[in-house]
Amino acid sequence: MLRRLARRLRRSAHSDLVGELQAIQGELRAVAARSAEASQRAAAALDVGAGIAQTIAGFPFLLEAAHNWSKAGVDAILRFEADAARRAESLAAGTEEGIRALSNASSDLASVTLEKMAELADLVADLPAGRFSHGRLPDITSEEAAFLNYCGSHLGPLADVGLWLNQPVSLEWQRGGVAVGGVNERIVEQPFVFAAVDRLPRGSRVLDVGGGESTVALALASLGYDVTVIEPQGYPFTHPNLTVFSDRLERFDTDVPFDAVVVLSAIEHFGIGHYEGAHIGAKDDRVAMRKIHDLVRSQGFLVLTAPFGPAEVNEVERVYDDAGLRELLDSWTIETVEIVRQTGLTTWVRETDALIKPDGAGRVVMLIARPIPQ
């Protein structure tokens, strides 16, 4: 609103003021001096406001607090705006009183604005945003740590706009510090994918199915591969070698098959309905694998990773055992298998290179398979 008011003052007053001052040469210097002072004060107020607005924009919960605070200030500014408009009308009538009144109104408005901005700055300083801007790590409170953990989680605001990424390492904010919160299966899955795709020459066509929360597709495109991502929720990155298909797998088609298809921690979610807009079906993972079979060329290959352990279906994902994987991949020939087990919060270790019955949960299977001609 302040910016709109400033523009209105410039549009409605400045040109008329110049015209009047040309006719009233004797008043030029005095009015110009007062107007310049008011403009400087208004500009300073707007600079302060812009900085505070930028801080508030990063923390949505501040908006409500700022709104509650600002009602009295807004009402006062609106009154000054109306007063300035009335005095501008007097200016248009060509009176010396109108010229001086407009300058006074601008000066008064700048004073009120600076006062209210100072109050808002004090308010923000008492909230986490202010502390995050100027505080040090030992100063972090338990409440602020919880807020930071929420913002960085899959439930936070980044996920709302499709910018949350499932990174291998997570950090956990604590009172007075921060520590490694955990290391997930992507610490082994991502290098396995890169090593598998590296056997292809640059420029080869690679399909990434369900890679929306990963940087793998972007990395492969940056390395020179021709990459397509299928992700119903969209993909936040762009690259000359990257194509994004923001829809479900069954609706995708191509006339040119792919040299490799990557399905990194994705197949277990098909048909579960965990993600917004996802289709629900008990056999959707097998339907997806048949579709992928049709998209890869006869000499191409599949790179797949998935949870491995006693067979289970929960509200988030499936966990495959050896029999479930063989059924899932009944139209593929498995060439390479790696089973990796989590032994601690931050530790994963290679367990075996054979597809055997899992000895408990907490494992991930990584494999390379070739399509069986149909």
Image: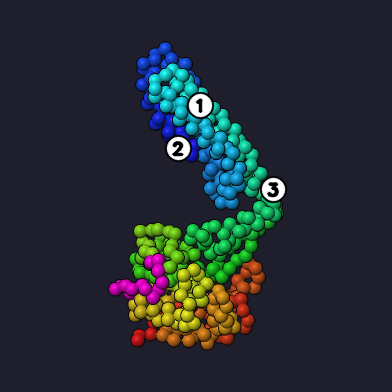
- Within-10-Å neighbours for mark 2: few <14, some 14–19, many 20+: few
User: Label for residue 139?
Assistant: 3
User: Label for residue 4?
Assistant: 2
User: Against 338, is 139 above or below?
Assistant: above
Which numbered disc, 2 or 3, marks the residue closer to the eye?
Answer: 2
| Percent x, y of residue 372 | 38, 85
- Within-10-Å neighbours for mark 3: few <14, some 14–19, many 20+: some
Real-space Cα separation, disc 3 to disc 1, in angstroms: 43 Å
Contact (CB < 8 A) between labels 2 and 3?
Answer: no
Q: Amino acid at mark 2?
A: Arg
Quarter holding the C terminus?
bottom left
Task: Give the secondary structure at mark 3.
Answer: helix
Q: Which residue is mark 1?
A: 105
Can you tell which quarter of the image residue 16 is in?
Answer: top left
Q: Amino acid at mark 3?
A: Asp
**Which residues fall within the magenta stretch?**
245-258
Can you tell which quarter of the image residue 291 is in?
Answer: bottom left
